Amino acid sequence: MPPTTNAAPTADLAPTGPRPLRVVIAPDSFKGSATAADVARHMADGVLAAAPDAEVRLLPMADGGEGTLDALLSVWGVEAREVATVDAIGRPRRARYGVSADGRIGVVELAAASGLPAVSDVVLQPLHAHTRGTGATCAAVLDAGVEEVVLCLGGSASTDGGAGVLTGLGARLVAHSVATVASSTDGELAGTLVPDGGEGLARVVGLDLGGLHPRAREVRWRLAVDVTNPLVGERGAAAVFGPQKGASDADVAFLDAALVRWADLLERETGVRTHDLSGAGAAGGVPAALVAVLGAELEHGATLVAQAIGLPAAVADADLVLTGEGSFDSQSVHGKVADGIGALAAAAPGRPPVVMIAGQVLLPAWQARAAGITAAFSIAPGPIDVEELVGRTASRLTEVAASVTSLYLGSVRR
């Protein structure tokens, strides 16, 4: 159950007669200074300082990328699990994953095994980096008996079209066509195995699913994405995201052609076309393989997380909603956490006000209101050095949340 703070009701503070003030706190993380769960707790301290009788629901959020696992674990009240796997260049690594309290939903962050930060200590390898470690992590989740896998895509170090996830789940990619190789006695394809990474996609001509994890096609796969880029082309995985993973112009051209070849093979094998699928370019093209082979569903990351933690119902029952993030800017109202919460509040019967508390507020008030954000406040007390503000994040979140709550209570008593 989501954490709830209760106290004895005080009638003169309640905005609607004897019912206590109901506040939902659903922030994103302040990257570099506080997790979403920490931000929520600090805001709650401020709310309760101003309204000790308030019913406060802490529902830390994420947009489907890094931080999503921790947000879900916090709301579900369970601990992370770990599995031995490999990073994006094949070095041993341990990756965290989560299983819901009822054992039904498994959560994997691609970045835990195959993320860019984990290989930042070496020269980036855009042609060889892979997602096989994420596939192994997904296999551990399947072994746990879940019915649904939520795979959070973001922070990827590779451009392998999801081939690594499939191999981590037991599939084999071969470099000789089915027509020119003999079948082995167990019915699997013979031939040379394709090397990991985008480079291997240029050589793959066969896909052997005989060794695929037995539960891989039995569960529901939900892919959390926050981009709409297709797999290939000028807006594809290689062209848009390859350079940040170390790809040169020549590498980008090579990887894009390799992804086209991979998508062609997937279409031949499964009948599913992923070349121009919206969102298939996320995380180096991982959705392409999982949509084609496993029937995975692409979902907007923040929406998926909101549904998983019960945010729509909580917002509908709230008097006041507080959210937050490090920088409230133009990106915030285009598919991010704030945008989703604003839409939920606008659709709720009582239309509760949504207040943004951010490290910095760069968005004009009219744009914030258009996205369903009633008001936005920075935690900066004035001109301040960034390092100093980071050190004061906790106390300032509490102070600003207390001020916002007091202002709300004053307005409803008029």
Image: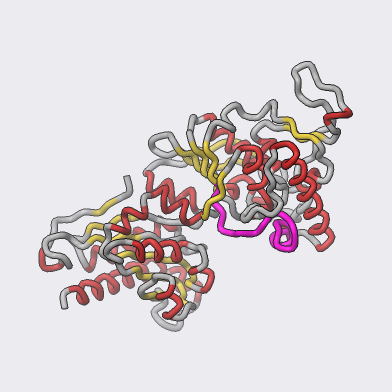
Q: Is residue 189 left or right of residue 393?
A: right
Q: Position of residue 316 (x, y in %)?
A: 30, 58
Q: On the image, which quarter does residue 397 sit in?
A: bottom left
Residue 344 in the image: above or below residue 146: below
Q: Is residue 107 above or below residue 9?
A: above
Which secondary structure type mostly characterizes the magenta part of the structure?
Answer: loop
The percent position of residue 113, horizontal first and vertical second, equals 61, 45
Q: Nearer the viewer, residue 261 or 128?
A: 261
Quadrant of the rendered image containing residue 294: top right
Q: Is residue 135 visible?
A: yes
User: Which residue shows up at 23% across the image and 57% down it?
Assistant: 55
Q: Position of residue 203 (x, y in %)?
A: 84, 42
In the image, which residues are magenta? 223-242
Q: Is residue 162 magenta?
A: no
Does 286 sit left or right of 397 as displayed? right
Q: Residue at x 33, y 48 (%)?
A: 2
Q: Position of residue 8 (x, y in %)?
A: 14, 56
Residue 204 vertical placement versus 311 (above, below): above
For the point 55% across and 31% down, the residue is: 218
- How many marks on residues? 0
353 vs 219, left or right, is: left
Residue 91 visible? The answer is: no
Q: Residue at x 82, y 26 (%)?
A: 190
